[in-house]
Image (cartoon, helix red, strand yellow):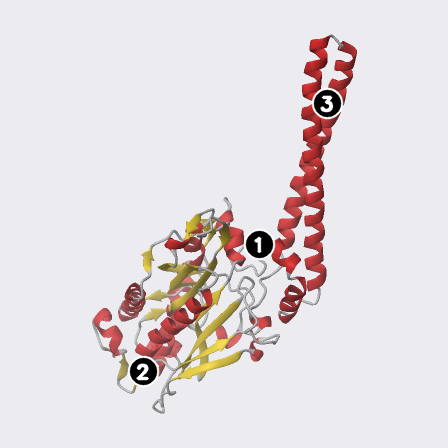
Amino acid sequence: MLEIATIRSQFGLAVQGLSKRGIKEAEALLNQVLALDKSRRETQIELDSTLAEANNKAREIGRLIQTGAKDQAESAKQETAGLKAKARSLQQKLVDLVDQQQQALYNIPNIPNSDVPNGSTANDNLVVAEWGEKPALHAQAKPHWDLIKQYDIIDFELGNKVSGAGFPFYKGKGAKLVRALANYCLDQADAAGYLEIQPPVIVNQESGTATGQLPDKEGQMYAISDSEQYLIPTAEVPITNIYRDVLLHTKDLPIKNVGFTPCFRREAGSWGSDVRGLNRLHQFDKVEIVQVNHPEHSYQALKEMVEHVAGLLQQLKLPYRIVNLCGGDLGFTAAQTFDFEVYSAGQDKWLEVSSVSNFETYQANRLKLRCRGEDKKNFLLHTLNGSALAIPRVLAAILENNQLETGIKIPDVLVQYAGFDTISL
């Protein structure tokens, strides 16, 4: 969440940044937070003054009793009782104001970086790089949802029977390809200096709130009905929460973690061709890279993470483009996001396979993730993450782009992991 000090000192820039997201009531939202903060500070001052006065009265009572001034002591006791009652009321008011301020801040998204393009929808996103040539397929080429039936490697009907729509079974070479992609991505992350983490896939409410998935405004989280726990939508949530309520030191930075987990998303409101086959699932596997970095170095880290994802796709020989998301399409917690889209030839469309984001201090403020500087002062760190990679759509593009009349050729870089180089009948 945004810092009060930042809102106060950079009010105009904050309004301008939120307006880039299309938030017309940005000034009113920020003024509400500042008004609540003013009331909170005034209440805190009044509470401190009341408690100090009550303490002084308590000491006075002792002196009066010692001097035999019983009537005055009794009067002072009554005043002290009144002051204590007032203090209890002020303490409750302070708790309510802190909660109201917190909730108001939860409703305000991150301020976009100045390099984020203006725009309100995905059509306004800016393509900043493109790599590879679109493959020329044979005349009978098919989309992946037909290929997986033809070669019997992924079963959506069985998944629907056992779990529901959007929960496929991967079989035989389909299952081996998922494992091959995961191991390839993990090995590449390891070579880039990321520490592998195998986190839980269920998190508590505090963890979801700390990284910005809660409050769940879009209804995308799967909640466990008999507890305040949730299935993770991405490994970002448990891995980033490793550093909740942690004080780091500059010598610890940068922190680089990678995790491979299943991810669970309700995908409420999704419809049409975008949800066919592997395009959009309720459960899918993803390798996620996460960094905690110094504010002065986080945008260099973002650049390096983008280059890392680009390298993965180039080795897989998948044509891709990099998109700088506009303000209106930016995720709630992100200051800047670059999406990677691969070209999937059987569908003749671009599929998002990675989002690489810098959250600046937005998550760190919720996490209470701070660093002790060389001057012994504490400051908020920056958090970043990226999909490296989301497996289903990468798999869809591999199947479609590498289909031949006699089968599907596996990218060379995956052969050592998969144990085969072709899928055929």
Q: Residues within 10 Å of mark 3 (few under 14, many from 20)?
A: many
User: Relative to 356, is 260 above or below?
Assistant: above
* Label 3 vs label 2, nearer the camera: 3
Q: Amino acid at mark 2?
A: Asn
What amino acid is labelled 1 in the image? Answer: Pro
Furthest residue in direction front, as rendered: 375
On screen, 116 above or below 64? below
Residue closest to the eye, 1 or 6 = 6
Q: The residue tagged with tag 3: helix, strand or loop?
A: helix
Spot occupied by residue 366 in the image (x, y as percentages of width and height): 53, 52
**Quick check: can you spot residue 375?**
yes
Seen from this angle, which residue lies furthest top? 68
User: From what the image shows, is residue 88 above or below residue 226?
Assistant: above
Residue 223 seen anywhere in this rendered image of the structure: no
Q: Secondary structure under badge 1?
A: loop
Residue corresponding to mark 1:
215
Could you say where residue 378 lies in the image, as x and y percent from the top left? 49, 50
Q: State the residue position of label 3.
A: 80
Name the image quarter holding residue 355: bottom left
Which amino acid type is shown beneath numbered disc 3? Thr
Residue beneath the point at 72% across and 13% down: 64
- Mark 1 or mark 2, earlier in chain: 1
Q: Are marks 1 and 2 in contact (CB under 8 Å)?
A: no
Task: Tell me, for residue 402, which label it has, or none.
Answer: 2
Q: Are the residues flagged by discs 3 and 1 in contact, CB closer than 8 Å?
A: no
Query: What's the distance in space between the residues labelled 1 and 2, CA to CA?
Result: 42 Å
Spatial separation of the CA atoms under disc 3 and disc 2? 82 Å
Determine which quarter of the picture holds residue 11: bottom right
Query: Which label lies toward us, 1 or 2?
Result: 1
Left or right: 358 in relation to 39: left
Q: Is residue 10 left or right of residue 193?
A: right
